[in-house]
Structures are given as C-alpha cells and as structure tokens.
Amino acid sequence: MKPEPSRQPTDSGTSVRLQKYLSIAGACSRRHGEELMLAGRVSVNGSVVTALGARVDPARDRVELDGCPVVARQRTVYIALNKPAGYVTSCRQPGEKLVTELVDIPERVYPVGRLDKDSTGLLLLTNDGALHHGLSHPSFDHEKEYVVTLAAPISDAALQKMADGMMLMGSCTRPAEVHRISLRRFRIILKEGKNRQIRRMVQKVGQTVIKLHRIRISGIRLGDLESGKWRYLDPEEIPVISSRRE
C-alpha cells in the first residue's frame, strides 16, 4: 500500500532538503534518496515523508531510513570571510544575495554575528553552535574592531561621546575604544553588538557613515584577505574565540 504523504517538517534558516541530508549522512546518493522517499522508506519525527521538496533541520529533526536513525556526522569547520557590500548575513532571505553563497564547501555553515548589507569585512561562519553563543553573548567580552569612514569631518568631542558611551535604543552603550585615523575616518573597538550600533552612534553625533569595515573579531584579524574570499581559521585561532572570559 502506498503511504499517505505526511505533514512537512518545520522549515528553518538551517534546514536542508531531506534527500541532501540523506546524502550528507552517507546513507545514499541524492537521487537514490528521492527514490527511497517516494517508496515511503524515509520518516521525519516519526512520520513518513514522500514530498521531494521536504526540508529538515539536522539540529532538531529525527530522520529515519527503514526505521533506523540517520545521523549526519560532519567535521566542525571555522571560516573567516571578507564580506563584500550587497550581501546579507543570513542563511535564507528571498531576493537577496547571501554570505553563505560565497563559501563553497560540503559542510553547511552559518554566520556568527552580523554585518548589515552595506557593511564589509570580517565575518565568521561555522557549524559549531557553541561558538555562536560564545561570540554573541556580551559576557564573553569578545572585541570587534571596525574602520569607519564618514561623509564629513568629525570633531574630537563627537569621538569622545562615542568612546564614553551614549543612550541608544533605551540603554547606554558600553565604553568603547575610539582612535582617529584622519578627519573623516576612525577606528572603534566594541565589546557588544546592538543592532546597527555604530551607524546609530554616528548618526546621534550628527554624522553619516559611508563605509563600515570590520577588521578584527577577538584575536582573528582580516589581514589581506580579498573581498569575497574566505579561509579556514588556523588551529591556534579557534581557542581564542571559543573560550569564556575569566
């Protein structure tokens, strides 16, 4: 008897097509995976799935083939990317160019932290969920360093206001290191990451950002990595960003 199509697994930003997941896990090829699905031999969360467009989230969904668990065991990877302008820091956003499209590897990785669409520079991508928490939570005190270019010259007083901290979105920003480079450029080092924080701070002192470029996250530096290019992190770089502040 042909099985009834089941409900679709919940889609998410980290989901993959079910037949691709079967292939990644080494259970079969993608094409054979489609045949197995149509034959009713594949289930997700206890329900048979026959729809070839079905997606699963490896972190949340339980996949079985002929009643046996299918587990994808991937190596953990850590990547530094020099994000170009025009790309969004997301795994899924219809109609937009995604930073994940710039990294062509078998493992599925996702961005750690964010850079807005117009900003450029260092972005980390990984399949290590613990690292995402370690870099995102303020208690870990990971520094992020940026070079900011403005539309007009900025005063020393305005730079000092950003360094001291200011009210932004209902709370005061933490003190930051700010160093002038030229009349219209400065470096800023933050230990937090409010939404569009630097752009909002600059706007509050009456200026406009025309270029925002991240050059460092904790001990990871962008260096001379070209725009749109990526590299694997060196082994000695990984403990620097995964350890908790004492």
Image (cartoon, helix red, strand yellow):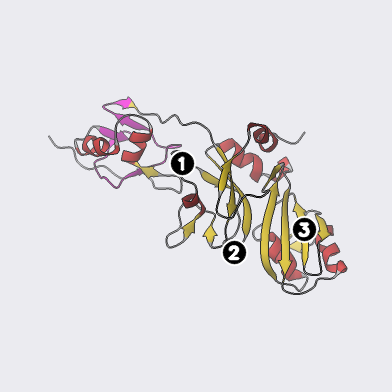
Q: In the shown orientation, is residue 193 left or right of residue 107? A: right
Q: Residue at x 54, y 63 (%)?
A: 86
Q: Return the x and y of residue 182 as percentages of the image width and height.
A: 81, 66
Q: Quadrant of residue 132?
A: top right
Q: Earlier in the sequence, mark 1 or mark 3?
A: 1
Q: In which quarter of the image is residue 29?
A: top left
Res. 47 mark:
none
* Furthest residue toward top: 68
Give the labeled residue for mark 1: 105
Mark 1, other Cα within 10 Å: few <14 / some 14–19 / many ≥20: few
Segment colored magenta: 42-68
Check if mark 2's residue and mark 1's residue have beta carbons within 8 Å: no
Q: Quadrant of the C terminus?
A: top right
Q: Return the x and y of residue 21 as percentages of the image width and height.
A: 36, 37
Secondary element under disc 2, as helix, strand or loop, is loop
Res. 187 mark:
3
Q: Is residue 55 magenta?
A: yes
Res. 118 mark:
2
Q: Return the x and y of residue 79 as percentages of the image width and height.
A: 57, 42
